[in-house]
Amino acid sequence: MIVMHSESRPYRSCCPAAIVWRFVLFGVLWLFLSGADIRGWPFGVAATLAAVWLHLRLAGADQRRLRPLAVVRFIPYFVGLSILSGIDVMKRVLHPALPIDPALIDFPLHIDHEGGRVLLADCVSLLPGTISARLDPEVLLIHTLDKGLPVLSTVRDLERRIEELYHRAARPEPAEERR
């Protein structure tokens, strides 16, 4: 059993509440992805159980507990950021001159645990116009459509919000990274 500690109490990833919470979360995700087609529920239950088992099996020792209210606040922020990024990409693609100036940008990471770094890399890849090219423990390499965009400040804000998901205060942004 993996034992983690939040700021208030120990957290056991294999306790019944953790298993139920994961089952509900993965079950709702399956319903969403399947279009809520109940005819496939036997497969959905099996897939959900497999996802719970796999998640518990792969959970690392530095896994941190997410704050549910922070997740609720994060979702609209991320969706809004995705929409704005999508509009920017759409304008660039539809513009006759195709105004892009691609670049690879090294982004020094402040997140000190693997789960947060992976979530950040995944979120960056889900934003239109950027993709995570390589994730190292200290640096995330980001490919962007336009090096003139405020990629560093946007990803630093995203990193800070991800840290808030895990009960951690993000470190202040260094002056040289502001764009």
Image (tube, rainbow, N blue to C red):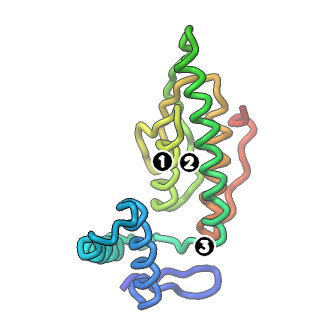
Q: Which of pointers 3 and 1 lies earlier in the amino acid sequence?
A: 3
Q: Kindly identify the residue that appears in the image at 49 percent across and 28 percent down.
A: 104
Up/down of 147 relative to 71, above or below: above
- Tell me, yes or no, whether the two marked residues, 1 and 2, touch with CB atoms within 8 Å: no
Q: Foreground residue, 46 or 142?
A: 46
Q: In the drawing, does residue 24 fall left or right of residue 107?
A: left
Precedes in sequence: disc 1 or disc 2: 2
What is the residue that sits farthest to the bottom in this orientation? 16
Please tell me whether mark 3 or mark 1 is closer to you in this view: 3
| Dot label at residue 109 | 2
Q: Percent x, y for residue 39?
A: 28, 71
**Which tag is nearer the camera, tag 1 or tag 2?**
1
Q: Which residue: 48% across, 47% down?
A: 121
- On-image quarter of the N terminus: bottom left
What mark, if any, has residue 31 been given in the picture? Answer: none
Snapshot quadrant of residue 34:
bottom left
Q: Is residue 39 left or right of residue 29?
A: left
- Secondary structure found at label 2: loop
